[in-house]
Image: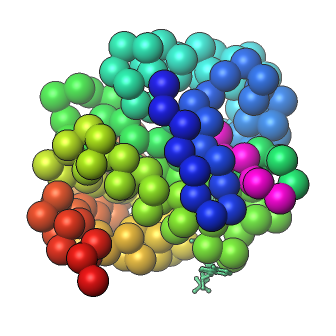
Amino acid sequence: MTILTTERLRLEPFCDEHLAALNALGSDIEVMRYLGGRTETLDDTRAVIERVKARWAEWGYSWWAFLEHDSGELVGAGCIQHLGRDKAKPLEIGWRLRRDRWGRGLASEAARTMAGFAFETLQAPLLRAVCHLDNAASAQVMKRLGMRYCGIERWNDMDCLAYEISAGQWRARQSP
Ligand SMILES: CC(C)(COP(=O)(O)OP(=O)(O)OC[C@H]1O[C@@H](n2cnc3c(N)ncnc32)[C@H](O)[C@@H]1OP(=O)(O)O)[C@@H](O)C(=O)NCCC(=O)NCCS
């Protein structure tokens, strides 16, 4: 299981200690608005953590909790996983932040580090991201990461904006 660090965050693979704070994140209707719109019960979050722990054990990547260095608080979460939860599909990157931490660049900061993990550690050839058509904030994070727009695709029973970046494009952006 891989812990990652950024300037402001420590990214820890989901574990049981994250339950209450992850549930607070998943039960905020504003956070979940473009993620199916359904909030999580405590049992839902418990099941998510169990599933994520199994993925880390089996695949070596899944969801991280974002712990803020300054406050020690869990302020978000992000992932590298397979689109449609199907191992045959390319990797996708995803993120969500606690509402009081929006607009500070934290999602973009975590995204750069998670993408680096996907390309450098996992040697992924391609990284994709999808979001609800109206989720401009998330699409903005994708663009800041250097992803290019690919069109509208259907994922998780939702029409989505799809973005992607290849390993070559990623490496070209890392060189000075
Ligand atoms: C999607 C989501 C994570 C984006 O959060 P965000 O705060 O907009 O994204 P960032 O953390 O990258 O912050 C970007 C903003 O911070 C600003 N910013 C960037 N770097 C910064 C820094 N170092 N210091 C302060 N502010 C900074 C940027 O200017 C940007 O603001 P702008 O859009 O007005 O230009 C957030 O809206 C969210 O959690 N939504 C609900 C869950 C969700 O929909 N997830 C995505 C599903 S696909």
Viewer-nearest residue: 3 or 44? 3
- For the C terminus, the image quarter is bottom left
Colouring chosen for the image of the structure:
rainbow
Magenta stretch, overall SS: strand
Q: Up-down: is 142 above or below 159?
A: below
Direction bottom: furthest residue: 176
Q: Up-down: is 24 above or below 107?
A: above
Q: Position of residue 161 (x, y in %)?
A: 33, 64
Q: Residue at x 60, y 44 (%)?
A: 11
Q: Residue at x 71, y 40 (%)?
A: 26
Q: Up-down: is 47 above or below 126?
A: above
Q: Is residue 17 left or right of residue 149?
A: right
Range of the magenta residues? 65-70
The answer to whether residue 33 shows anywhere in this view is no
Direction right: furthest residue: 71
Q: Residue at x 83, y 47 (%)?
A: 73
Q: Up-down: is 104 above or below 45?
A: below
Viewer-nearest residue: 94 or 173? 173
The answer to whether residue 88 shows anywhere in this view is yes
Q: Is residue 115 left or right of residue 56?
A: left
Q: Position of residue 63 (x, y in %)?
A: 52, 35
Q: Position of residue 32 (x, y in %)?
A: 65, 49
Would you say residue 30 sits in the magenta stretch?
Answer: no
Q: Position of residue 46 (x, y in %)?
A: 70, 18
Q: Is residue 75 left or right of residue 87?
A: right
Q: Quadrant of residue 55?
A: top left
